[in-house]
Every structure is written in C-alpha cells, then in structure tokens.
Amino acid sequence: MVLARIVRWTAALSMVAAAALVAAPSSASAAPPGFRPGAPGVGDPYFPLEGNGGYDAQHYSLDLAYDPATKVLRGTVHLLARATQDLSRFDLDFQQLTVRSVTVNGLPATYTRDGQELVVTPRSGLRSHSLFDVGVTYDGIPQPLGGPIVFGQPYGWIATEDGALVACEPNAASTWFPSNDHPSDKATYSIAVTVPKGLVVASNGVLTARVTRGDTTTFWWNELRPMASYLATATIGTFDVREGRTPAGLREWVATDPTVPGTEVVFQQTADITDYWSELFGRYPFEETGAIVDNAPVVGFSLENQTKPLYSAVRSETTVAHELSHQWFGDSVSVRTWQHIWLNEGFATFAQHYWTEHTGGESVQAWFDRQYATRPDSFWLVKVADPQRDTMFDTAVYNRGGMTLQALRVKIGDEPFFRLLRTWAADHRYGLADTDEFVTLAEKISGQDLTGFFTAWLYTPSKPVTW
C-alpha cells in the first residue's frame, strides 16, 4: 500500500536525520557557533511572515480527528524537512490552536508562540543539508480568517452543519495544520482524518484506505506530487461519492452534497474538461482529477484545491473549467510570490472563456471586446502584475489578466500562443514562476519584442490604447 511505503520512508529518513544532529547537552537546547535561526518569513511582499527560512519542506504526514458536534480538531503532524543552513531554530506557521507537544527527530523540543509563528528550538543544531522530522501535537477549534483579501468572505477551516469546508488560499493552511505556509515551498502529503461514521473526508491525491472502527471512519489520502500548502483540503460532510475514469482513462473521484441540486452533471463535466485541457495544455500533472461540491452558504467562492477543486453551492460549467485549468496554472505551476497571482487567475479566466468558445458559445474575442468597451475607469487602475495584497483578487486581476492573454493570442497568433501555454506548463511543472519569466518565454516563442505590450497590459494603471 502506498501509505505504508510512505510511513516506512518517513521513518527511515527520520533515523538518518537524527544521525545528522550536532551533539549538544541533553539538559538544554544549544547549538554550536555559526548555527543561526531560520527567517520567520520567505520575504513575500504581500505576506512578510508567510513561509519560513532555513529549511525546505519535503513531506507532510497529517493524522487528524474532527468532531463536528464540538467542532474540535485534534491532530499530530509530522513534517519531514531538509535544513538549508546550519540551523539553531526554525519557525512553522500555525495559528490559534493549542500546541501540546513538539518533537524534532523524536526528541522533545522547546517552543514558543509569536503570533502566527510557532518557534521551535531543537535540543541540538541541525546541520545544513540534513533531513529532520518535526512533530507537532495539538487541538482546538479552528477559526477561519477574514478581512478584505478573499472577497470579504471567511476562508480557511470553516465549520459546516455536518462537517467542515476547507479552502485556504492564500494564507489559511496555518489555521488547521503547522506548515511552511507559502507556495514557494511545496511538498508531498499524507492526510489521514478520522470522523464520525457516515461522514466522508474529501482530500488531495488518491484515497488509499477507508477503515471503519466502531463509531468512526478514517480516510487515508496521499498526494505524491508537490503541492502548495494553501491547496491542501480535508473537507468533511455527508457526500455522495462517484468514482471512475475520464474518457481518456484518468482516475476521477467526485464528492457532492446531496442537498445541492444539479450536481449529477459535475462528474461528466470534470471528465470532459480535464481531458480537453490535457490536450490543449499538455499532460495532466497529477494522478487523479475530481471535485468537491459542498452546501456552505457562508462561502460564495470556489477554489482549485489540488486534484479536488472545491465548489460552493453556486457553480457553473465555466466555473468547473476555470478551476480545472488551475491544475496546470496555479497548482502545478505556482507563483513565486503572491504579487504574480495573475499568472493563476488571468490564465484561468482566459481558459473558462476559451471553454465557452470551444463548446460553441461566445468567442473569447467577443468577451474581450465587451469587457474593453464597458469596464469603468476604476477597472483599469489596477496594475495586474502587482495588484497589492488587499486587492490581489480584484476583478481586474481575473478579467484584465484574461484579456492580456487574449490580446497576446491575437498579437502573436494561435499556434505560437498555445505552444507558449504548453511550454510554460511543461517548463515549470511542479515548480515556481513569475511574470518576468513568462514575458521572456513569450518573446522567445513569438520572436517579438513584447516589452511595450506587457507594460501596457500588466503594469500601467490605465486602459491600454494601442499594443
């Protein structure tokens, strides 16, 4: 079983990591001269404290239990990481919940809380390049985040009548598990969640086991491709589950809330759209495609959780097309820092309108012309390639971003344009990218100087007139 292999692999690497510890007195946490703390953030201009320095996350193993009646989440999380410097201490992003214990390579470690930072000091310094395992046991009632960033709505771990909806973009993974919570540090995941019998846990990757003991059921999920923390989910509820394969043979798993009408079409929509995007954008990046449709009136948005996009009760076929295109643009190819969010949302907005064109509806150009003619002056004030934190999901990031791609399509022609998208997805598969890299690749493939074009569309706070 895949899960068993991962457990054995993690245990073996933890033994190797323990051997890499620098000797220090057992009575106190200490590190030799030259060892220093990891930074409390990765330097993202929008979220200075998101992510952490000094290590590279390799694999998360989450062992969780959730009781919808009390809303209490209990968990033990092990993070396998590689030190990127001689490390005296390091941070994890973790909010609100009560920490009961922390270990490093199986040995108790000291820790403090500083806002969202869980500051961990191992008994001994960790050598640069060494692997180490940090374990955190905790419990509490997760609280979602709010504010203006995500359309003024709550996001993160959100309690529902029968479970929880988990949608974490951009910075809310830390509301339910300790992590290096920034897309620049991807890792693989094993996620085990125990819930009352009769409920379903929908998560990332492939469901490898489902075991009922007494009044509870545990679901084991494995995502063996690199994943950003904000794309992790453990959505819990009373779901109808359908499993199968797309016409092209890809595994598919779809969970739908039976109280949401019209969900019977989601399985076929997901299959058809995933297969078509695989033809247009290149091979599907993951082992399984799917969907989660949950009845959560408090949430009015959808999210491209890796392999299992999450849809609220409000969704359409174009929403499915949008979120599934993110599996390439956002999930497989992730932003280096959040200011480049148009590389996710502009691409997905173009894709959803291209799906409409592909299926015989309005062309992308007709949509472009309508946007160009009717958008008010305020729409054009947003610099799409640097929209600022509180407006990073502004309408312009989506629509002006999508318009940028359609204008580029017209400027360089269909064949170079779609070759550009496929090359972009292939060159940065499972990796990171930014706007400058996209501009460079676009110029290389088109053979054109596109400096003025991208300046007008992405960086100028006014309506482009010529390009």
Image: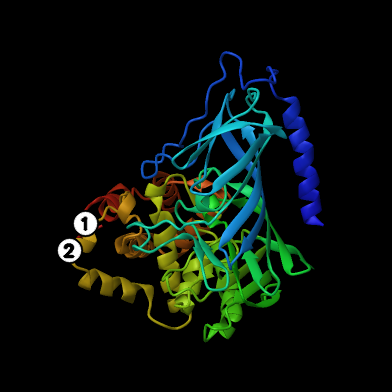
**Secondary element at image label 1:** helix
**Quadrant in which the C terminus appears:** bottom left
Q: Residue furthest left?
A: 377
The three-letter code of the residue at mark 1 reads Leu
Left or right: 65, with 439 as reference point: right
The three-letter code of the residue at mark 2 reads Asp
Where residue 219 sits: x, y (%)? 71, 63
**Residue 379 to residue 199: above or below:** above
Q: Residue furthest front?
A: 70
Proximity of marks 2 and 1: CB atoms separated by less than 8 Å? yes
How far is the residue under mark 2 from the one under mark 1? 7 Å
* Residue 409 visible in the picture: yes
Q: What residue is shown at x 60% (from left), y 63% (from top)?
A: 307
Q: How many marks?
A: 2
Where residue 201 sits: x, y (%)? 64, 67
Where residue 143 sits: x, y (%)? 47, 57
Left or right: 27, with 394 as reference point: right
Mark linked to residue 381: 1
* Residue 423 visible in the picture: no
Left or right: 323, with 47 as reference point: right
> Circle 2 sits on which residue?
377
